[in-house]
Image: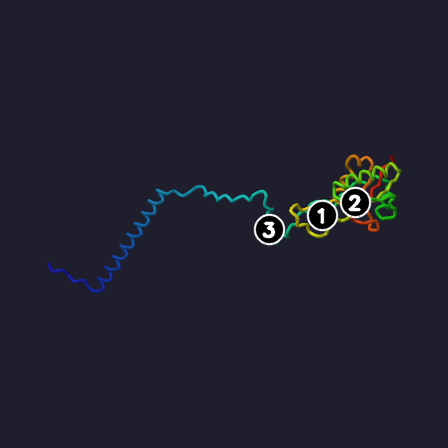
Amino acid sequence: MKRRTLSDEEKDLWTQVARSISRAETHIRAEKMARIFAAKNPPLTKPLPEPAQPRAPKNLLEAFRLGEKARTPKSKPWEPTTPAEHLAQAPVQMDAKKHTQMTRGKLDPEARIDLHGMTLAEAQPELIRFILNAQTAGLRLVLVITGKGKQTPDHGPIPQRMGVLRHQVPHWLHMAPLGPAVLQVREAHLKHGGGGAYYVYLRKR
């Protein structure tokens, strides 16, 4: 039996049919693979949890938002640093009118002692003797001169505090045996020495 040769039109038609069959088979295979994959990997019913955000340490500043004004840090309470500031914070024990006159330099001291240039060991007994004798004599307002201390830096092997007597004398005046005799201590007015001297108002004996 002799085979018939296909015409060009029949060849084109056969080629189109073959392509369509190939595409259909590919599509069927893809759907089959998709069903198999879906059966083995069912869809998640719950969303994955979001990663936890790291917490900022408690000692850090509060969160700052864009556009927000910077917060002004709370200022620390003022603390006295000099002997005069410490004395100014002490309550007024003497007569208020006399206290005002004394701090304005309108009361003249009835006696004075100059400790300037003395060492601590020399100055303390001299101060004790002077204050107790003044109280015994009935004096009320005396002046204790300490000086402001050296102004140049100390480069010695053992640095000394600047104005040692100026810092130490107010402590001595509030300690025994002088504490019971002293009613008020204030920095002197400029006309009586300013920061280098102290008014000491004595109690009545």
Marks 1 and 3 sit apart, C-alpha to C-alpha, by: 49 Å
**For the residue marked with disc 2, what is the amino acid?**
Leu
Secondary element at image label 2: loop
Looking at the image, tell me whether mark 2 or mark 3 is earlier in sequence order: 3
| Mark nearer the viewer, 2 or 3 | 2
Q: Which residue is identified by label 3?
A: 65
Q: Name the residue under label 1.
A: 162
> Dot 3: what SS?
loop
Question: With 9 as the anchor, is 200 left or right in this view?
Answer: right
Q: Residue at x 72, y 44 (%)?
A: 79
Q: Distance between the residues labelled 2 and 3?
A: 61 Å
Q: In which quarter of the image is residue 35?
A: top left
Residue at image location 69% in from the left, 51% down from the top? 153
When the figure is inspected, residue 190 is found, relative to residue 179, above or below; the finding is: below
Q: Residue furthest bottom?
A: 8
Q: Name the residue under label 2.
A: 115
